[in-house]
Image (cartoon, rainbow, N blue to C red):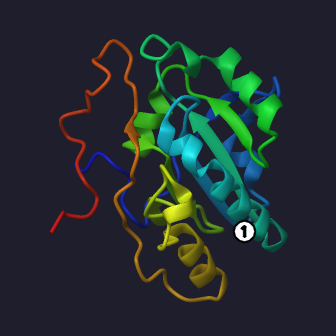
Amino acid sequence: MAFTLAIGSQAPTFTLKGTDGHMHSLKDFDAAPVLVVFFTCNHCPYVIGSDETTRRTAERFKPRGVTFVAISSNSPHTYEEDSFDHMVERMQEHKFPWLYLYDGTQDIARAYGALRTPHFYVFDNTRRLIYTGRAVDHPRDASKAKVFDLDRALEEHLAGKPVSIPLTNPIGCNVKWEGKDGHWMPPEACDLVPCT
């Protein structure tokens, strides 16, 4: 069985604490015609380098009913700056247009098969997965980005078309798993698209 959620799969449910101090569940977003769940963190240079690009995408598609939800699953024992308190500080500083949820048990990262930060998952109104992978081709320095995979997937879906490229490899730091070396990945984790 593949580590990462397969296209067409139902979104795994969750109930997680947000940096706003409230608990949030998947069902809370039932009214959103499109839901983007993405795994992120505080310290990763690929996240930091592309957060403003992600912000622009979230703001661009919000009027069309697309809701973004960010989840951090990184162990703070690997990078202390990935702690919940630092998540709260980061949201206070940057005021991102999404909820920022904490997956302290890492169960949700396993359920979705999150590989890297950032890693994006797009679900339709029935919460079936229609796209997963990267947002852009150069997340560490988004000024160099030439391919905007997330934007394309959202545009195609909202236009009533099938997503032409439903799978891309996320680009970023690997998820920092509790009790493991910082570079460790689950043995069943693999690229979503074979490298050529």
Q: Residue at x 77, y 44 (%)?
A: 96
Q: Residue at x 72, y 62 (%)?
A: 56
Compared with residue 137, is residue 28 higher up or lower down, i.e. above or below? above
| Identity of the residue furthest to the left in this view | 196
Q: Quadrant of residue 60?
A: bottom right
- Total labels: the figure holds 1
Compared with residue 164, is residue 30 higher up or lower down, i.e. above or below? above
| Relative depth, front residue between 94 and 188 | 94
Compared with residue 69, is residue 90 higher up or lower down, i.e. above or below? above
Q: Is residue 176 left or right of residue 85?
A: left
Q: Residue at x 25, y 43 (%)?
A: 189
The answer to whether residue 114 shows anywhere in this view is: no
Q: Is residue 48 left or right of residue 168?
A: right
According to the picture, the residue beneath numbered tag 1 turns out to be 33
Where is residue 121? Give x, y as percent: 51, 56
| Relative depth, front residue between 111 and 21 | 21
Where is residue 2? Give x, y as percent: 25, 50
Q: Is residue 164 left or right of residue 193?
A: right
Secondary structure under the numbered disc 1 in the rendered image: loop
Q: Quadrant of the C terminus?
A: bottom left
Disc 1 packing (10 Å; few <14; some 14–19; many ≥20): some
Under mark 1, the amino acid is Pro
The answer to whether residue 64 shows anywhere in this view is: yes
Q: Quadrant of residue 35?
A: bottom right
Where is residue 24? Give x, y as percent: 74, 35
Where is residue 25? Give x, y as percent: 70, 39
